[in-house]
Image (tube, grey):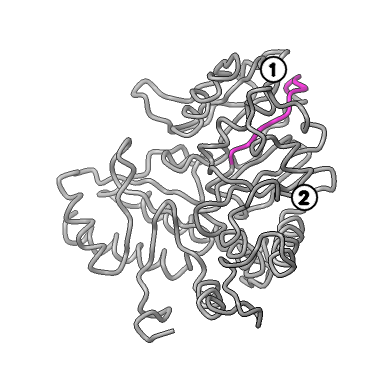
Amino acid sequence: MTASLSASHRPFNFSAGPSAVPEEVLTQVAAEMLDWQGSGMSVMEMSHRGKEFGSIHEAALRNLRELLQIPPNFRILFMQGGGLGENAIVPMNLSRGGAVDVVVTGAWSRKSAGEARRYADVKIAADGANAAGRHESIPPAASWQIRPDASYVHLCSNETIDGLEFQHLPDLKALGSDAPLVVDCSSHILSRTVDWSKVGLAFAGAQKNVGPAGLTLVVVREDLLGHALPICPSAFNYQTVADNNSMFNTPPTFAIYVAGLVFEWIQRFQYAGKTGLAALEQRNIDKATLLYQTLDASSLFENRVAPEARSRMNIPFFLRDERLNDDFLAGARARGLLQLKGHKSVGGMRASIYNAMPLEGVQALVSYLKDFETQHG
């Protein structure tokens, strides 16, 4: 690696996705690009059915199960199509053409509801939008209107655009529902532990916390397999994918390889006397706490999300004087703080501080926020 790409010189990438990959992983990918472990091939050149890629694939499955403590009655599927694709694939597999209830907490869950309407009778069980149409809080689970015949209940556990996160998944049984919970956890997968006793299916696009775009992780309880609608394409039928160990069609091999390296990086990661996922979760808490405290103490910047619903991963913020937006972004780029512009649908700014973002990156952003406020506040 050249000096210009060293950790001290690379900018801090706050992109919401595709997002930063741990530098240690990128270094290993570069070193193995032409010849993976003496095989004479790059991973992207390997047959997905060959023994070399088979070992990569099995290690990735094993390490992901270990990291997230996924119970044995759940299958891990490596699929394609991203979170948006799963918005169609899930109802084709689980709705049985019947009732699907969706909890809307932001742009992504609203989009999920719209896509599911192509295949099922969708009802909004709760909608957290305020009078201005903004999502700044999560409706209490006790207020959700879940139908007794719902095939499943869908929620997005971390809204990338709006910056809301479920700190705890709801217990649908405690709400009187036997429906399985479907969780879109694309933008906070592997940032915290998961209570699988409350989950029927979870899915996540890889391009936030796991690696390059192209891979989609699906973790599905075995009893939910085998119920796909007749119109469901074979490659998207969870039963077919599970029966073929995610090899029914050619999987996104290179993305799986990089994801596997990320899983190993997480297993090795140490912070605050902890190791692995617990260490990453603690660092994520510390990063988010630092940034939110800075925003809350500011008279120039603001975050509008209720404290109990704030995301650790995606932090939208706004300048109270929006005429300063362009100056703020230009100054950020000059300091090596990239991709801070907010989503076009909500405006403002957004700092996505996924697992690969070091604490030093958030400290650099906080320093810039304070300096900018001194100059313009």
Q: Indicate the quadrant containing the C terminus: top left, top right, bottom left or bottom right.
A: bottom left
Which residue is at a point 42% across and 48% down the rendered structure image? 315
What range is drawn magenta here? Answer: 175-184
Q: Is residue 261 above or below residue 152?
A: below
Residue 258 counted in the magenta span: no
Q: Calculate the distance from the C-alpha at mark 1 to the C-alpha at mark 2.
A: 25 Å
Residue 235 drawn at (x, y percent): 65, 39
Circle 1 packing at 10 Å, graded few (<14), some (14-19), many (20+), is many
Spot the residue most to the right. 72
Q: State the SS at label 1.
A: strand
Marks 1 and 2: CB-CB under 8 Å? no
Pointer 1: what residue? 150
Q: Quadrant of the N terminus?
A: bottom left
* Residue 11 location, quadrant: bottom left
**Horizontal and vertical percent for residue 313?**
49, 51
Query: Residue shown at 38%/29% (left/top)?
Result: 134
Q: Which mark is residue 70?
A: 2
In the drawing, what numbered circle is on residue 15?
Answer: none
Tell me the quarter of the picture where residue 62 sits.
Answer: bottom right
Q: What's under tag 1, amino acid-wise? A: Ala
- The residue positioned 74% from the left and 38% from the top of the image is 240
Instruction: Identify residue type, mark 2.
Output: Ile
Q: Is residue 65 above or below residue 237?
A: below
Camera-side residue: 271 or 214? Answer: 214
The stretch drawn in magenta includes residue 179: yes
Task: Identify the element where label 2 is drawn.
Answer: loop
Q: Nearer the viewer, residue 373 or 217?
A: 217
Residue 220 is situated, as x and y percent measured from the top left of the image, at 73, 39
Identified at 32% across, 66% down, the residue is 367
Q: Is residue 35 left or right of residue 337?
A: right
| Left or right of 311, for residue 231 | right
